[in-house]
Amino acid sequence: MLDPANVPDVDAEEMTARFVVSKRHINKRTSTLKADAFVPHPYEELSVTRLIETTEDEIWTVGRDVAAARTPPRTLRGRGDVLAATYLRQENLKVVADPVEGNPNHANVTGWPPADDEAAQVMIAKEIAAVAKFVPPPES
């Protein structure tokens, strides 16, 4: 994981992960993610985790922690790996480092359309989901 005292800006060539805690965000037939996995609604920021300087075990631990912190707690279904440049190619989106306790690799994708314009958020999310790589969690 990144050193919490020395977190660099997000580089366009970095890989990010969006943790998936809902079965409805996964297309079971194609093992791909649906756009809803990348829609920040009802928010205007999308939480992701940077994959730099981290091991697979560390990233899955963070993902399980994210799922467990939900109310009610959820099961981690997988993650969607997306190059930061994918977000940056969308008009107005930025990927901003936002370290949190337990996850110095946390970042937010900002610059989304307003939360009351979910249709505009979904249009952007469809383009992101189209190139995202779904990674199922390792067998326990």
Image: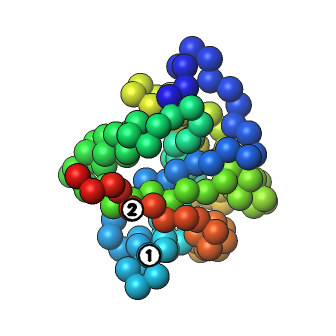
Q: Which image quarter: residue 6?
A: top right
Amino acid type, callout 1: Ser
Mark 2: give few (<14), some (14-19) or many (20+) Cα within 10 Å.
Answer: few
Query: Closer to the camera, 41 or 46?
Result: 46
Q: In this view, does 95 lie to the left or right of 4?
A: right
Q: Which mark is residue 136?
A: 2
Relative to residue 65, is residue 27 depicted above or below?
below
Mark 1: give few (<14), some (14-19) or many (20+) Cα within 10 Å.
Answer: few
Query: Closer to the camera, 90 or 41?
Result: 90
Q: Distance between the residues labelled 2 and 1?
A: 9 Å
Q: Tag 1, which secondary structure? A: loop
Q: How many discs appear?
A: 2
Q: Where is residue 60 in the image (x, y as percent from the top left)?
A: 37, 45
Query: Closer to the camera, 110 or 7?
Result: 7
> Which residue corresponds to the image point at 51% horizontal and 34% vertical from the top-left?
54
Judged from this view, the residue extending furthest toward the bottom is 29
The reply to whether residue 101 is visible in this rendering is yes
Q: Which mark is residue 31?
A: 1
- Mark 2 near mark 1, Cβ–Cβ under 8 Å? yes
> Which residue corresponds to the image point at 49% horizontal and 74% vertical from the top-left?
32
Q: Which image quarter: residue 7?
A: top right
Q: Where is residue 25 in the image (x, y as percent from the top left)?
A: 41, 70
Relative to residue 88, is residue 107 depicted above or below?
above
